[in-house]
Image (cartoon, rainbow, N blue to C red):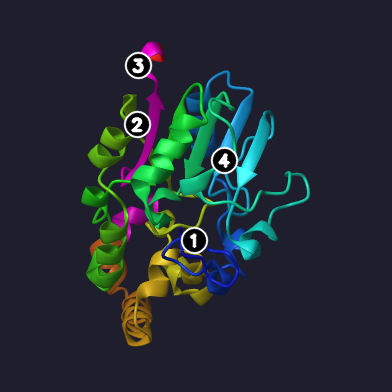
């Protein structure tokens, strides 16, 4: 049985506490969305697991969304269907019920990765599409210089890509997902060329990794980055990120198909 928090959150982060600004900062970036749509192929029925507020949920398909957090379900916009209250480890659907299944920035939250992936494969006839991060590529920009703790937290939470593929037991393709300079989805890497954005406490609150840090660590980060931006030392050392068109960071798209479709 998966342990759930007061609002139903079933992972390691408490979305009942984090969620108020989440939908405002975590908007789907259209360039990342295109890669997800391409991975889904011609699937007409799609299951979205850990759907949250609906980021990256296709609007041109028949989508069934699953989200355990009541707070996150309440943030889904009116044009999306209501999400079902359920967890990845116990999906309430029959075998092979969907053409494809999708999960974005979710698998690192699950209590039992193997069970969740097995459930996604069980209910899916075609591709299982997973947007996640490679923990070995977390230190891809300036953030570890200012807050190594948040990078360490992120790396410890995301499962190795090879482990995800092994547990799925399918034929898998791993696609890098570049982060554009003007990315509108506010995960940490989205601010690689706009460091001022991470000085906003609500922006940080929309990235679950910050919720695991002690307040004094976060305060130190904000004070040090503010100082270096004010005196120009950040730009002298890291200013090239401001014009870098895209960051080849840790984002990965895993597209996993049954062997018969590989």
Total number of numbered discs in the rendering: 4
**2 and 1 marks in contact (CB < 8 Å):** no
Q: Is residue 65 left or right of residue 119?
A: right
Work out how far the residue at label 3 is from the one at label 4, CA to CA, in angstroms.
Answer: 22 Å
Asked whether residue 250 is drawn in magenta, I would say yes
Mark 3 and mark 2: span between their CA atoms? 18 Å
Location of mark 4 (residue) = 48
Q: Which residues are magenta?
A: 239-260
Percent coordinates x, y for residue 234 in the rendering? 29, 69
Q: Establish if 70 lies above or below 48.
A: below
Q: Quadrant of residue 210?
A: bottom left
Q: Give x and y (percent) for residue 8.
A: 58, 64
In the image, 78: left or right of 237? right
**Mark 2 = which residue?**
175
Of circles 3 and 4, the one toward us is: 3
Residue 41 sits inside the magenta stretch? no
In space, the residues marked 1 and 3 are separated at their CA atoms by 31 Å
Crowd tier of the residue under label 1, counting other residues whose Cα lies within 10 Å: few below 14, some 14–19, many 20 or above: many
107 over 238 or under it: above or below: above
Can you give x and y, in whole percent of width and height, for residue 262 in the image? 36, 15
Q: Is residue 245 visible?
A: no
First along the sequence among labels 2 and 1:
1
Mark 3 or 2, nearer chain start: 2
Kind of element beneath mark 4 = strand
Q: Secondary structure at mark 3?
A: helix
Foreground: 14 or 60?
14
Q: Which residue is mark 1?
A: 10
């Amino acid at each position: 049985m998966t342990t759930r928090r007061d609002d139903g959150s079933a992972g390691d982060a408490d979305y009942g506490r984090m969620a108020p600004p989440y939908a405002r900062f975590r908007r789907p970036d259209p360039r990342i969305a295109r890669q997800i749509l391409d991975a889904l192929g011609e699937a007409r029925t799609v299951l979205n697991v850990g759907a949250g507020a609906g980021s990256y949920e296709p609007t041109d398909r028949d989508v069934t969304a699953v989200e355990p957090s009541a707070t996150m379900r309440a943030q889904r916009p009116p044009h999306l269907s209501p999400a079902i209250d359920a967890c990845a480890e116990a999906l309430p659907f029959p075998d092979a019920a969907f053409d494809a299944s999708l999960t974005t920035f979710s698998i690192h939250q699950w209590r039992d990765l193997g069970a969740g992936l097995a459930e996604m494969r069980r209910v899916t006839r075609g591709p299982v599409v997973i947007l996640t991060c490679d923990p070995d590529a977390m230190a891809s920009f300036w953030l570890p210089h200012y807050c190594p703790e948040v990078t360490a937290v992120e790396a410890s939470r995301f499962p190795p890509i090879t482990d995800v593929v092994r547990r799925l037991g399918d034929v898998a393709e791993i696609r890098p997902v570049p982060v554009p300079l003007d990315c509108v989805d506010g995960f940490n890497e989205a601010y690689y060329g706009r460091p001022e954005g991470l000085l906003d406490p609500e922006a940080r609150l929309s990235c679950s990794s910050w919720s695991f840090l002690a307040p004094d660590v976060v305060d130190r980060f904000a004070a040090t980055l503010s100082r270096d931006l004010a005196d120009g030392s950040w730009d002298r050392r890291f200013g090239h990120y401001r014009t870098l068109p895209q960051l080849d960071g840790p984002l990965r798209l895993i597209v996993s198909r049954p062997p018969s479709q590989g």
